[in-house]
Amino acid sequence: MVAGTVHTTPLTLKSQAARRGPAPLELVAAPGAPAHKTQKIRIVASLAHVELKLISAKDEPALKALCPHAATVVLKTKNGPVTRSDAVLKYVAGLNPATELCGADGFCRGRVDQWLEFGTHELEVAVVAAQVHAKSKDVVQRAATDVLNACVTLDASLQKTTYLAGDRVSCADVSVVCVLRAALKAGLVKTKELKPSLLRWYLTCLHTPAFDVLEGAKQDALQALPQGRAPSKAKPTPKKTTASSKQPKDPRTMFQPTFARSRERLKELLNRGASAIGSTVVVAGWVRTLREAMKGATLFVELNDGSCLASIQVVCGNDSTTGFAEARACGGAGASLRVEGEVVESPGKGQTVEIRCKAITVLGCTRGGPNRTVGAQTYPLAKKYHTAEHLRTHAHLRPRSRIGSAVVRLRNALAFATHEFFQQRGFLYVHTPLITAADCEGAGEQFTVTTLLPPEHDKAPKLPIVDGKVDYSKDFFGRQASLTVSGQLNVETHAVSLADCYTFGPTFRAENSNTSRHLAEFWMIEPEVSFATLEDDMALAEDYLKYCVAAALCRCADDLEFFEGNKCGGLRDRLQAIVDTPFKRLEYTEAVEVLIKEMESGRATFENTKVTWGIDLDSEHEKYLTELYKGPVILINYPKDIKSFYMKLNADGKTVAAMDILVPRIGEIIGGSAREDNLEILEARAKSVGLNPEDIKWYGELRQYGSVPHAGFGLGFERLVMLCSGVENIRDVIPFPRTPGNCRF
């Protein structure tokens, strides 16, 4: 290459062309089309970073020529025309899914559709009627009444939310704002008549730069504010603009995304249903089943990509599918394929569409046998039913099974809901250490972290011993260190400085427990709230649990239906009852009395028959209480001797302000308390459980320097997944279970 010249390869040119993006979409509007119909599409195009060219049809026949049933607008696309303004709106928004303008999940998408319909039937119909029959006072008056009623509904809905659907501007906000602006311009309602929540939402949307196409709307709305009714004519002294004083922006609108999948996920394709028929798609995934027909001339492939429980059938013909021979020899179940073809109506039962394959590429064959021969029948996950034990021995492949993939999607939804819940309430996410020198529970069931162990080939270990004990001062950290059993003590340091915090991470317990409810490694969610009491803690915990269960019901409907059919009958009804029913509050003392009475009457029998005040209730006792009260129970005020040292001592000196939430079929799922904020009492409690206050001096100093009342709780994430899935063994709801004697993968 000659010095000073730049060699541009064809690939680079192609990349440059791709970055320039496609030609702008053309939106053709009928003569005299209502302004709000094109305005909302232009706003959404701006938010979605889609280039749009607005063209005015010269006359109505010109619009009809593009699409016979078009009334006001037509969007030209490579797949044909799209008509009706709301359909165009959603099509344009869908071109950039990352902006989530149509909703971030199934629930929000439903809310978007609901408000789009509301805008059309409750607002737009009234506006159009008033414009068409402007000379009829009765029609105009009825239209004005309808608009005012719609505004009342909007205000009531917006009193608890910032936007109509989700936590950001969506198609619903854009559409309703534009129609409301049209109603204001038509005089059907005055800006000063808008109630506070509605006006706040209206102004919030108008402050988004994309809404600038509604010229004058922001200024009119600002004058409706109490401080804006008599704006000063004098120009204010301009302030120096700094980065920190600029209007906050949505990060999704601040750059042009470059990532785009080269395939369509099956979840989105199957959600399109019959509307996808006739379109050409590219999908990729793993073969669940492959069968031949017509003496090997046709292949029926069941393909799944993990995005949802359902698979799609791909039909390949030896004379119509490129790559047919390679696909036929791919090895069947487990092989990975890329498929391009046309979506057609499926004649089979239980499926709306299938793909008529034009080209198929084998990405990875299934190999087996001693020579790893393609097609050898050694793939461990056949279509038949597998036991939980079998899937655990193949945990690296378990996500490809139906139950394994459903658990992963449910874990994902619950983890997202966890962050969503706390972030929406102003909590800060704190990363707490996994290696610690503090034993939060004081039980000593910790995994030691050390570098003192000699190499395996050293047959004469020489650990530093002082007074018969290992001298950890010679170790890596200069003291004994362990894997954390809880992040609570660490997150408290931030809660008493930043008020409301939470941590969500792995924790470790060296308990030799081979039960269906215990793991050596599991995940914990631990929020901490300052200036709070036990009552606040219980309310937060109940809200959080209900929110997560509701999120599972809304976002994992297909997976929950699968779990329900997989020996978990009535699952969704049980979960709905948790969302709908207030949790029962019950004193520990009263609970013990109830259990004793139930045993004496013969209505209850327990393996542990010694139910007395002061015992730590077993899971069988906890489950019985939830059955007795037909739902979750919050037990409060436990004996101090069975609870941790940091829990606040009650006035009776015998109990602590602690609470456990018990749920059906699982028992305890949440444990929490008010924290002891008196330094002297805390130190005395630490000594009583064998802790040296000097070892947690830093924890005591949180009480020494500006102590505040605070409370928090911990939830074992895997038990939450068990609750929402109905899966009975905790080892089946975590990707790689760590239990006594088992640390594979």
Image: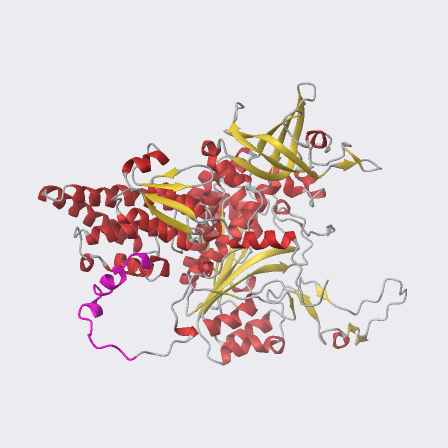
Could you say which is closer to the camera, residue 424 or residue 529? Answer: 424
- For the point 27% across and 49% down, the residue is 35
* Picture layout, residue 469 above or below residue 217: below
The residue under the point 61% across, 49% down is: 517
The question of residue 224 being in magenta is answered with yes
Which residues, given as a range, are shown in magenta?
212-237
Q: Is residue 494 magenta?
A: no
Relative horizontal placement of residue 282, taking residue 467 as reference (left or right): left
Residue 319 is left or right of residue 45, and the answer is right
Residue 399, quarter of picture:
top right
Horizontal and vertical percent position of residue 608: 59, 47
Q: Is residue 633 above or below residue 77?
A: below
At which x and y percent is residue 474?
Answer: 77, 76
Check the picture and name the quadrant holding the N terminus: bottom right
Given residues 425 and 339, the one toward you in this image is 339
The residue positioned 57% from the left and 65% from the top of the image is 487
* Residue found farthest to the top: 294
- Look at the image and tell me whether residue 268 can be seen: yes
Classify residue 360 by image quadrant.
Answer: top right
Colouring rule applied to residues: secondary structure
Q: Position of residue 579 (x, y in %)?
A: 41, 46
Query: In front here: 358 or 417?
Result: 358
Q: Is residue 70 visible?
A: no
User: Foreground residue, 290 or 220?
Assistant: 220
Q: How many marks?
A: 0
Q: Position of residue 707 (x, y in %)?
A: 46, 76
